[in-house]
Image: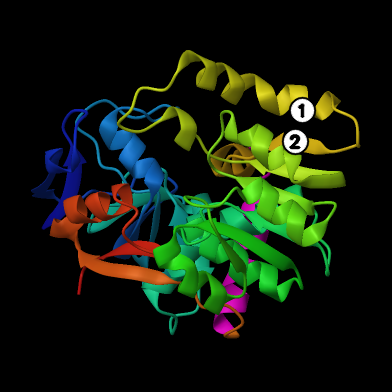
């Protein structure tokens, strides 16, 4: 039996993504084969494709894809947790852009069969990241003020949805054309291209916000830090300042790596932490299963509805990358498979 998957053959632009057909993979000991119904597309996939990903990746060619939702198709020896036909979701980091994927059974989380796979896969990376940053890192409390950057992104929209449930008052930096969706979701938009978000926040709050979530990094962290009131928390979780088409200045690289530590010594009892979803869930495997199960329950109870920007077929993976690089969409892009 054959299946299709997307491969990165060498670093480059979206055009280097290729769809190949090959024999369906066989699950190894303690692995489960999943028939993928939805695969998430993430900014991290773009970093992998362009050769800028900060973590380890397989040798070329390999398949990108941070998160998948699907159904159990076959079982390797020694598996016992998931029967065939059960719906599941998982973080994969790589390998998700494929019709079938084999994963360790401990990486899978069960899902009710009646949920939309595209919405389910949005939980695995975007909502899990948002949930853990809000609750496990920033320890947000009802009534607090927070600032979200890239508020219309997959993680940003997830933060607004979860922040609204948590009773937060939220500001979100976003381009003018995406103000409406940020307002509809429940945050106050700030046009980062035409306004100084530091001034906007301080003018609106007088003494700043309780928490900031920054995916940009570099010198941007200092500006985010300036919006914090006493005992405020800054969570850094991205590297936009030092990745992309333009080669970053050496100063940006230095600030990106050292500012998170240095800022913790400033007065005001403000804290800065770095969050990375795979690092945290490797260190705390109980978080991964508990938090994803919590999010699945919220989805099943219709308390959250992930923002799906586009549903595209596997062969349009290159277009999905182009849309993300152009910041042309709000929410999550999902590849739909096995339909």
Residue marked by disc 1: 263
Q: Residue at (36%, 67%) from the top-left corner? A: 70
Mark toward the viewer: 2 or 1: 1
Q: Residue at (61%, 57%) from the top-left corner? A: 130
Say left or right for 265 vs 236. right
- Main SS, magenta region, reads helix
Say left or right for 203 vs 75. right
- The image quarter containing residue 7 is top left
Residue 243 vertical position relative to residue 111 in the rendered view, above or below: above
- Secondary structure at numbered mark 2: strand
Residue 52 vertical position relative to residue 38 in the rendered view, above or below: above
Determine contact: label 2, label 1, CB under 8 Å: yes
Disc 2 crowd, CA 10 A, few/some/many (<14, 14-19, 20+)? many
Disc 1 crowd, CA 10 A, few/some/many (<14, 14-19, 20+)? some
- Residue closer to the observer: 306 or 176: 176
- The image quarter containing residue 60 is top left
Task: Magenta stretch: give its range.
Answer: 283-300
Q: Does residue 81 appear in this view?
A: no
Q: Does residue 60 appear in this view?
A: yes
**Could you say where residue 138 lies in the image, as x and y percent from the top left?**
76, 50
Q: Residue at (22%, 28%) from the top-left corner? A: 11
**Could you say where residue 76 lies in the image, as x and y percent from the top left?**
37, 52
- Residue closer to the observer: 335 or 138: 138
Q: Quadrant of the C terminus?
A: bottom left
Measured Cα–Cα span from mark 2 to mark 1: 7 Å
Q: How many marks?
A: 2
Residue marked by disc 2: 272
Say left or right for 136 vs 320. right
- Secondary structure at numbered mark 1: helix
């Amino acid at each position: 039996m054959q299946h299709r998957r997307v491969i990165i053959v060498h670093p480059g632009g979206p055009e280097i993504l290729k769809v190949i057909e090959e024999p369906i993979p066989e699950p190894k000991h303690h692995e489960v084969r999943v028939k993928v119904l939805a695969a998430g597309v993430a900014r991290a996939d773009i970093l992998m494709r362009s050769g800028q990903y900060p973590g380890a990746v397989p040798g070329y060619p390999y398949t990108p894809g941070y998160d998948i939702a699907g159904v159990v198709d076959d079982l390797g020896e020694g598996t016992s947790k998931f029967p065939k036909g059960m719906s599941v979701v998982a973080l994969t980091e790589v390998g998700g852009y494929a019709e079938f994927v084999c994963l360790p059974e401990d990486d899978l989380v069960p899902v009710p069969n009646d949920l939309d796979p595209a919405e389910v896969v949005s939980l695995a990376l975007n909502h899990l990241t948002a949930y853990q940053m809000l609750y496990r890192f920033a320890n947000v409390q009802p009534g607090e003020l927070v600032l979200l950057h890239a508020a219309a992104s997959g993680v940003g929209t997830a933060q607004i949805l979860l922040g609204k449930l948590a009773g937060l008052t939220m500001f979100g930096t976003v381009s003018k054309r995406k103000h409406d969706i940020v307002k509809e979701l429940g945050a106050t938009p700030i046009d980062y291209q035409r306004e100084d978000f530091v001034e906007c926040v301080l003018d609106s709050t007088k003494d700043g916000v309780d928490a900031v979530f920054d995916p940009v990094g570099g010198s941007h962290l200092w500006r985010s830090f300036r919006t914090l009131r006493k005992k405020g928390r800054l969570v850094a979780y991205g590297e936009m300042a030092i990745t992309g088409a333009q080669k970053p200045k050496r100063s940006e690289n230095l600030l990106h790596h050292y500012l998170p530590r240095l800022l913790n010594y400033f007065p005001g009892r403000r804290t800065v932490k770095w969050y990375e979803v795979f690092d945290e869930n490797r260190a705390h495997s109980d978080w991964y299963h508990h938090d994803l199960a919590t999010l699945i329950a919220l989805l099943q109870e219709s308390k959250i509805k992930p923002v799906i920007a586009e549903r595209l077929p596997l062969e349009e993976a290159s277009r999905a990358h182009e849309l993300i690089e152009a910041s042309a969409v709000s929410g999550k892009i999902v590849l739909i498979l096995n339909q």
